[in-house]
Image (cartoon, helix red, strand yellow):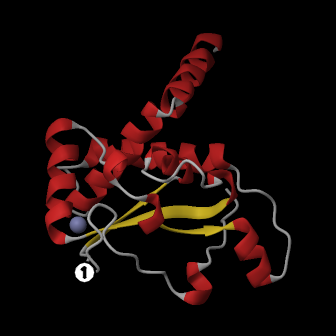
Amino acid sequence: MRPVPRLAMYTGTTEQPCALCGDPETTTRLELPPRTLQLMRNGGPVAWRDVVGDVTIFLCESDWELVRDLAVDYGMHPLSRCNAARASFSLRADFEAFVNATREEQDHASVERDHLARADEVLDAYGDDPMIETRDLVEAVVARRALEELGVADERETAVAEESDAS
Ligand SMILES: [Zn+2]
């Protein structure tokens, strides 16, 4: 797939406070597909289709533990408690102004497929592969559950089932 240039490559990542409580001291970050902004508080007005690259949320130590337990023990995502105003992402208009070029709209379906494929790899390999950390597992659970809730993961599964029926 065509790599999407990220604003972070040019300016350094914009560190944000904890997405849950606003604590400026954060220990962990999760990278999520832009559509997940729709599940966050104050995320409704954000033009998620214009986001370039991923959305990053930052978590303080205690909220990381909460989010980790929610994801690992209950298979839940915390996004309804995350404030989109504290998420870090680049909007296409800003990005174009910065690089002074018009770029194609990001292919969100492809971004989401990549997230789901990565999430499923992590979910399968966690516990066997020592390189996969708990943070990776939590990111995988959050991305997968969020995309399922948004109806994206189901669509993908349906499409896969149809393909295998046809073969
Ligand atoms: Zn916090």
User: Which of 33/115 is in front?
Assistant: 33
Q: Position of residue 4 (x, y in %)?
A: 66, 66
For residue 123, above or below residue 134? above
* Left or right side of 150 for 93: right
Question: Image quadrant of residue 32?
Answer: bottom left
Instruction: Tell me which residue sits at (41%, 40%) in the image.
Output: 146
Q: Position of residue 91 (x, y in %)?
A: 66, 67
For residue 32, above or below residue 62? above
> Taking the image as four quarters, which one is ligand 1 found in?
bottom left
User: What is the crowding at mark 1: few (fewer than 14 residues within 10 Å), some, or many (at least 20)?
Assistant: some
Question: Image quadrant of residue 64?
Answer: bottom left
Q: Position of residue 166 (x, y in %)?
A: 65, 12
Q: Residue furthest bottom?
A: 11
Instruction: Tell me which residue sits at (45%, 44%) in the image.
Output: 39
* Left or right side of 57 for 76: left
Q: Quadrant of the C terminus?
A: top right
Q: Quadrant of the N terminus?
A: bottom right
* Amino acid beneath label 1: Glu
Q: Residue furthest top?
A: 165
Q: Position of residue 125 (x, y in %)?
A: 27, 47
Instruction: Tell me which residue sits at (16%, 54%) in the image.
Output: 66
Considering the numbered disc 1 on the image, is that residue within a helix, a strand or a loop? Answer: loop
* Res 125 seen here: yes
User: Which of 163/101 is in front?
Assistant: 101
For label 1, the residue is 25
* Res 132 seen here: no
Number of numbered discs visible in the structure rendering = 1
Instruction: Tell me which residue sits at (50%, 62%) in the image.
Output: 55
Question: Image quadrant of residue 156?
Answer: top right
For residue 116, above or below residue 60? above
